[in-house]
Structure formats: structure tokens, C-alpha cells
Image (spheres, rainbow, N blue to C red):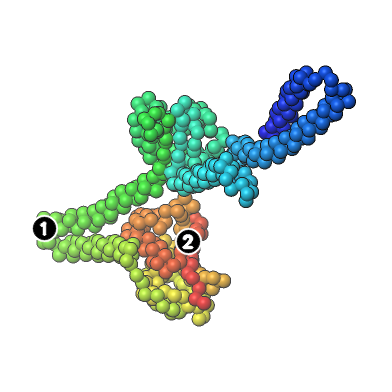
């Protein structure tokens, strides 16, 4: 593309040519009025003089106009080049302005336009980045369809939930996407009715089961124009699980309370119906009532204990304690139950090992684990307690030679009221809350507990506590 300066030079040359031609014609007419007596020599001198004068005038005119045109056309060329770069998206382009050209309104205006566009571009980029961050961080799956019904936006949560990528879905309609039928029906309902819809959907992808609360709504522009629809999928799997745990807890508590209450009520009615007349029968029935009352009291005590541990304000008194002393106290408490089953215990505790713990609560933990090992072990077997230090923690292991636990039951072992052998647990007086109490107390000590087991071989509970430095 030719610059304005080159165009002005050409135009200036054409104008000079026209000017000189006109002057030549005027001179021709002028010489016709000369007297015939003037000789040819004088005429040639006049012509030569006029030609020289006109040539000098033409050169001066050309030089001066060239400089003037150059001064103004240069800034216009630079402004045009800058404007073309700005039109191409280069908002950093600027038109140079010399100090003597501070009144160059065109260049100043173009530079101001460039700065405004640059600011708008930066703000737009920032808003786009914020929107992208918001969409990716919202924690719920997002799927947006355009006016024509094709996907134009989705986030990482949706990709992870359904195992797809944005490259696979962008531009496809909802019928072309492998979505559960319930979600497709909801999308179609939103498109057809242009109203918001909500539905709970259960998804099984082969690896895990998800419960989603799917909400779909039309996207309406500022002027009421239809832009498409948006689908938001809230993962409520944890809420469903907690609701199921709550229902199980209520059912288990009701069942555990009903059993001793039914026994007490039944034997009391039997006594009132005439069994009191037989001292031996009455003594047996009263013994059963006392046993069931004790079991009921133990259950209520454990429920209150667990409820208190789970409260937000629950606190324990941490101080350095020696493990060997605590474990010996716990063994003394369960020694009677061990003697009844003729069981032995082996203690492998490093001397001088200390942990930061609440002594009474930690004895409670060890008693629960030892009692659990006694209840689920055969007679004349051995329980082993090992306490050793590692690099950053102290490990306490309680091993038994009991019936063992299958791998399918291990994840639920620390749930409230969960029992492997319900009949044996009730016979031993267990409430099904001991391991749940152990788990919460160890977590209150900033540690954790895990379990390993093999059916028919035995079970090992391992407590991990931070090591005192």
C-alpha cells in the first residue's frame, strides 16, 4: 500500500507540471505583443531569462511543498499504520509523537483509543480468567448448551464425574452425549418448557456410585433473548451416605434398646403372673432382669460417651505419659475376662516410650481393644501388645488369634453398632460402640487407627500417635 507521502509527492509533481505548462502558454501569448523591431538576440535573452526564473521558482516550489507535505504526511502515515495494527488486535501499538508535534491531534487520539482498548482487553481477560476459575472451583458439575442445542461450556468436575473431556463434547448436542437417560430427559424438558427443572439421579460408573442433584434452567439475556440452558450437577453422595448412616443408627439404637427392654418387660410380667410364688424361678428371672438392666445401662452409657466425644467442644487433657504403665493398667482391668478364657498376654513395649495423651482416655482405648480381642478369640490363645517408636510416630499394636475379619467387612468395622458376629457380641455384653469410641478418641489425640485381619488367623489393630520430640 502506497504511503500518503508518496501520493502527495506525485500530486505535487503533477501540479508543478501543470503550473509550468500554464506559464509556458502565458509566455507564448506574452511574446506576441513584443514589437517586431526587437531583434532575435534580445528575444532569446528574454526567453532564457524567463526559463531560468521559472525553473528556479518551480524548484523552490517543489522543495518547499515537498518539505511541507513530508512533515504532515509522515505523521498521517504513522497514524494509519498504528490504526491498522490496532484494528488487527495489537492494542500495544502507539503512534510516535515528537516534542515539536505536541499538537498532533490525530496521533494523540489514536494513542488514546489504543490505551482504552488495551484497558478494556485487560479487564476482559481478567473477567474471563475469574469466570473460568469460578467455574472450575465451584465443586459442582457444569454443562451449558447454546441456543442451537450444542455444548459450548463444561467444567472439570463434570469431566471427572463422567470421564470425558471438553474436546469430546464441545459442539455436540445432548442427544449425542453419553449421559444417563434421566439427565437427558431433564435437558429436553428445559428446552421444551423453558422452565427450571430439578431431579435426583443415581449414577453407577462401574467404579463408584454417585448421587447427583441435577438442576437445569434456561439462560435468558439482558434483553430477554434466549441464549441456551445451563445444567448444574451437585454431588450429594456424602449427604445420602450420612442420611443412610443416620437411619441405620436410629434403627440400630431402637433394636438394641428394644431387646433388653422386651426381656425386662417379659420377665417382669411373668413374675407378676405368678412366678413370684416359686422362689427359684423368681430368682432366675430377677437375675436375667438384672443382667438385661446392666446391658441397657452399658448401652446408654456408651451412647452418651460417644455423643460427648463427637461434640465439637470435646477436649482431652494431653500430657506426656509412659506407655508401659498405661498398658499394664489396661491389662489389669481385663485380666478377669482373660482368666475366664484361660488366655495369655505378651507385652513387647519399649522402655521409656512416651506419648502425648490423656491417661484415662488412653486406658479406655486400650481396654476396648483388649476386650474386643478377648471376645473374638478362642480359649487358651494369646494376645500380643507391641509398642515401638518409628521416625515420626509411635505405633501400638494389639494382635489376637481370633476368628478374623473378612476384607469386605473391614471398611465398616468402626461404624457404630456394626458387629461381625452379632450373637457372640450380645452374649459377651458388647454394645457395638467400642471401636467407634476408639476411633474418635484416637483422632482426638491427633492420631489414627487401622486394622489388618485374616479370617481364621487373627486381627491386628494398630494405633498411630505423633512422637514426642
In the picture, measured across the screen, residue 256 lies left or right of residue 335, that is left
Is residue 427 placed above or below 17 in the rendered structure?
A: below
Residue bearing the label numbered 1: 272
Tell me the quarter of the picture where residue 185 sits: top left
> Between tags 1 and 2, which lies in front?
2
In the picture, the quarter occupied by the N terminus is top right
- From the viewer's side, name the closer residue of 364 and 154: 154
Horizontal side of residue 273 vs 342, given as left or right? left
In this rendered view, identify the residue nearer to me: 89 or 468: 89
Q: Residues within 10 Å of mark 2 (few under 14, many from 20)?
A: some
Q: Nearer the viewer, residue 368 or 129?
A: 129
Residue 180, located in which quarter of the rendered image? Answer: top left
Q: Secondary structure at mark 1?
A: helix
Mark 1–mark 2 distance (CA, rounded to whole Å)? 50 Å
| Residue 456 seen in render | no
Instruction: Tell me where residue 415 appears, x and y as whole percent.
Output: 38, 56
Of 370 and 434, the residue lying toward us: 434
Residue drawn 37% across the image and 25% down it: 192
Q: Please give the name of the residue rendered at 69% of the width and 32% of the height, measured from the top-left corner.
A: 8
- Left or right of residue 331: residue 166: right
User: Which residue is rendered at x = 42% and y = 74% of the image?
Assistant: 357
Task: Give percent across and percent down for residue 334.
Answer: 38, 72
The numbered dot on residue 450 is 2
Check disc 1: other Cα within 10 Å, few if <14, some if 14-19, many if 20+: few
Provide residue 337's location: percent of width, then percent of height. Answer: 37, 70
Q: Residue furthest right?
A: 41
Circle nearer the N terminus (1, 2): 1
Q: Secondary structure at mark 2?
A: strand
The total of numbered circles placed on residues is: 2
Residue placed farthest to the bottom in the image? 352
Horizontal and vertical percent position of residue 28: 77, 20
Tell me what residue is drawn at x 74 percent, y 25 percent: 23
Amino acid at each position: 500500500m502506497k504511503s500518503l507521502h508518496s501520493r502527495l509527492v506525485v500530486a505535487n509533481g503533477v501540479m508543478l507540471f501543470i503550473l509550468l505548462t500554464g506559464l509556458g502558454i502565458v509566455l507564448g501569448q506574452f511574446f506576441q505583443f513584443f514589437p517586431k523591431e526587437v531583434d532575435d538576440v534580445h528575444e532569446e535573452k528574454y526567453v532564457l531569462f524567463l526559463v531560468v526564473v521559472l525553473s528556479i521558482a518551480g524548484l523552490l516550489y517543489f522543495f518547499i511543498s515537498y518539505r511541507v507535505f513530508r512533515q504532515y504526511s509522515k505523521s498521517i502515515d504513522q497514524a494509519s499504520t498504528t490504526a491498522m495494527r490496532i484494528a488487527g488486535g495489537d492494542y500495544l501499538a502507539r503512534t510516535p509523537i515528537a516534542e515539536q508535534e505536541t499538537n498532533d491531534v490525530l496521533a494523540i487520539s489514536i494513542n488514546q483509543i489504543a490505551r482504552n482498548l488495551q484497558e478494556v482487553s485487560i479487564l476482559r481477560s481478567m473477567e474471563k480468567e475469574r469466570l473460568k476459575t469460578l467455574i472450575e472451583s465451584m465443586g459442582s458439575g457444569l454443562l451449558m448448551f447454546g441456543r442451537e442445542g450444542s455444548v459450548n461450556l463444561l467444567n472439570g468436575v463434570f469431566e471427572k464425574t463422567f470421564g470425558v473431556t471438553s474436546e469430546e463434547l464441545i459442539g455436540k448436542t445432548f442427544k449425542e452425549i453419553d449421559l444417563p437417560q434421566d439427565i437427558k430427559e431433564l435437558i429436553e424438558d428445559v428446552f421444551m418448557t423453558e422452565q427450571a427443572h430439578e431431579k435426583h439421579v443415581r449414577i453407577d460408573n462401574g467404579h463408584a456410585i454417585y448421587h447427583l442433584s441435577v438442576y437445569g434452567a434456561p439462560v435468558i439475556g439482558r434483553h430477554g433473548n434466549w441464549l441456551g440452558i445451563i445444567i448444574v450437577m451437585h454431588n450429594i453422595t456424602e449427604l445420602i451416605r450420612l442420611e443412610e448412616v443416620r437411619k441405620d443408627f436410629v434403627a440400630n439404637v431402637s433394636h438394641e434398646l428394644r431387646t433388653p427392654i422386651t426381656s425386662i418387660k417379659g420377665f417382669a410380667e411373668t413374675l407378676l403372673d405368678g412366678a413370684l410364688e416359686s422362689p427359684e424361678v423368681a430368682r432366675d428371672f430377677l437375675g436375667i432382669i438384672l443382667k438385661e438392666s446392666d446391658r441397657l445401662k452399658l448401652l446408654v452409657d456408651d451412647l452418651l460417651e460417644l455423643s460427648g466425644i463427637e461434640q465439637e467442644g470435646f477436649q482431652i487433657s494431653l500430657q506426656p505419659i509412659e506407655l508401659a504403665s498405661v498398658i499394664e493398667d489396661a491389662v489389669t482391668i481385663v485380666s478377669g475376662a482373660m482368666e475366664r478364657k484361660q488366655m495369655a498376654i505378651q507385652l513387647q513395649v519399649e522402655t521409656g516410650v512416651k506419648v502425648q495423651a490423656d491417661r484415662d482416655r488412653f486406658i479406655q482405648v486400650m481396654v476396648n481393644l483388649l476386650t474386643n480381642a478377648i471376645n473374638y478369640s478362642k480359649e487358651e490363645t494369646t494376645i500380643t501388645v507391641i509398642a515401638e517408636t518409628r521416625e515420626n510416630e509411635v505405633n501400638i499394636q494389639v494382635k489376637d488369634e481370633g476368628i478374623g475379619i473378612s476384607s469386605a467387612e473391614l471398611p465398616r468395622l468402626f461404624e457404630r453398632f456394626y458387629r461381625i458376629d452379632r450373637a457372640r457380641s450380645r452374649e459377651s455384653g458388647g454394645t457395638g460402640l467400642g471401636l467407634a469410641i476408639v476411633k474418635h478418641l484416637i483422632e482426638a489425640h491427633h492420631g489414627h487407627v487401622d486394622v489388618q485381619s485374616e479370617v481364621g488367623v487373627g486381627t491386628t489393630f494398630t494405633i498411630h500417635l505423633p512422637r514426642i520430640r
